[in-house]
Amino acid sequence: MPKRFRLSSPEIESIIEVRKKARSDLHFLCTEILNYTDIEPAVHDPYTKTHDRFLSGSAGTDLITPTGDFLYIPAEETYSVSIDPLVKRNALFLGFRGSVKTTIQTIGGSIQIILNFPHIAGAIYHNTEDNAKIILKEIVDHFCTNPRMMEFFPEFCFSPEDRKKWATMGEFTTPARFHGDTNILPHKKEPTLAALGLGTSQAGRHYQFIKMTDVVEQSNSFTPESRAKVAAGVKMARNLLEDGECFLFLEGTPYHPEDVYCQIIEREWHKKAPEDREWEIVWHPAYHPDTKGQPRTYSPDEMSLPFKKAIQQVTHAPGLYTKPGKRIPVWPTWRNGRRKFDNRTLEAKEREDPYIFACQQLLKPAAAGTAIFPVDKCFHIYPASHIDLKGLKLGTEPIQLKLMSVDTASSTDPKYSNDTAISCAAVTNTMLRVITHGICGLLNDVEIIEAIFEFNQIFRPDVVLIESTQFTQGLKGQIKIEELKRHTELPIEWVTRPRTASKNTRVQGALRSPFSLNRIKFSSDLSDDYLDRAKMEMSGFPTSKHDDLLDSLEMLVTASASSSAYSSERAKLRALMAEEQERMKKEAQDYARWFTGQDFSDDFIEESESIGW
């Protein structure tokens, strides 16, 4: 065991204090022990402080004998047992490219866990095994050649001459696992840390923590098959954890709205209440979101916010500043004042490749020029003065079909993010769809039914499309009761959504072409709340918190495009009704003329005589 002779009591206390702080403070470990001097609290606290929570309550006991023997006794034999049970067991760190998140999370974070639990078994995953080995080499170098590590954690380290004994290209084991010559803890067949590629077979091995870095790349994000393969690789990696109490850490940048990172955000953050979430998620783009003066949360809740713009010039260092009206960068300069990611640097990247910039720096694969439904190109207002619902006209075009769609929430609990959206569309034979009425918000059953009947009275839809879900089973009965009370039968069609495609795929497939071709427009009479909600969902889809209004529009478009049969039948029925109304009107006029003694047509006289008038 490494020794240091003739240590005084103050020296021993000082060393123990450094060891404790390095185990509990990732920022201190990275900057003071690992010598990553470019890590700054103002920029990197979202990474370091979040990771520190995953070691809450893990402190063991440090012992240094007067002769200089170092000894560390973990708090518990198992990492998961020693951690606060309220700490989530999964973490996703999405950070802008160049923010040293891999250095902090994967390299520094792995070393911090090992220093707390020398007997632990962990794994590092990258998209390829070779890339994982490069990261592992940097970690091993700290245990082999870093003088600060060898000074304060000598029992964890080994000399360059012994490197082959403790490390290979694909794995390494710390000598601290064995406490010198005495194997106090049970022997593990797994190394302290292994380097693996996504999909690498690890039959028979189990780990207590896994770090996955940049498993999503541009090359594996293009097709549904490649994205599914990455998601399956992450799932397979989770199966290598010893139990449900072990830890999985993901970090990287998203490249597609449906890659595994965005799937986790959608599933865990947007669809679950905070107390039900299984993931800690950090979202840290290159610009500050505009939180309207509120403290930043660095969570997916900020994804739908616009980026903050400077009201007046912001000086970061001599000669480096953000002009008024420009987005404010998170890390504009190095500590010494040199240019890092200021506006000039970031805007040059954006001009070079807007898509890569949106992914790597904004963390929004559907941002700005790459948005699926860019508001500046897809959001169109239709003058309310051109809408004639009684005369069935949109400008000069006849209305062929009137549809109402109801996308209900699965819960009315405000902790959840799904609202109810009701939209009414007048459709022409050129497939122009004008949204004339609508509401979107957190509505209970009574409010939903009231809105449906109110829009039915005003809009007179040919069909009311309501999504059939478990939540709407009770709604069906309540609507029937209300129909009897109001002596009104609604033309309801209960819609069952297909499960062969995700909601994002379904919404994008149905709406992208009509929006881009200017075939969906919004009446200027719609409420500001509805119009603002539409723009918010369009600009943020599919990574924003809400997509309920778009879901209701998808129902309208799908019905108007795929239901040509009942569309034509209803058009025929409307034509027959119009003919009947004209015939009845003519009869009433002829009767009035006969009653007042005015002249009648020969047809009317013959018809009157034939029926005995």
Image: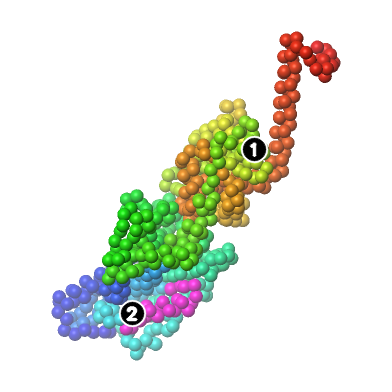
- Prevailing secondary structure class for the magenta stretch in the rendered image: helix
Pair 2/1: label in front: 1
User: Horizontal and vertical percent for residue 611?
Assistant: 82, 15
Closest to the observer, 355 or 302:
355
User: Horizontal and vertical percent for residue 18?
Assistant: 23, 73
Which residue bears the numbered disc 1? 396
User: Horizontal and vertical percent for residue 388?
Assistant: 60, 33
- Determine the residue positioned at 46% across, 77% down: 131
Q: Is residue 535 left or right of residue 329?
A: right
Q: Is residue 506 left or right of residue 125?
A: right
Please indicate, yes or no, whether residue 135 appears anywhere in the rendered image.
Answer: yes
Give the quarter of the figure containing the C terminus: top right
- Find the distance from the CA under tag 2 to the CA under tag 1: 75 Å
Q: Is residue 314 part of the magenta span, yes or no?
A: no
- Determine the residue positioned at 44% across, 83% down: 169
Determine the secondary structure under disc 1.
Answer: loop
- Determine the residue positioned at 31% across, 65% down: 320
Which residue bears the numbered disc 2? 142
> Which residue is most to the bottom?
161
Which region is colored magenta? Answer: 124-145
- Determine the residue positioned at 44% across, 79% down: 133
Determine the secondary structure under disc 2.
Answer: helix
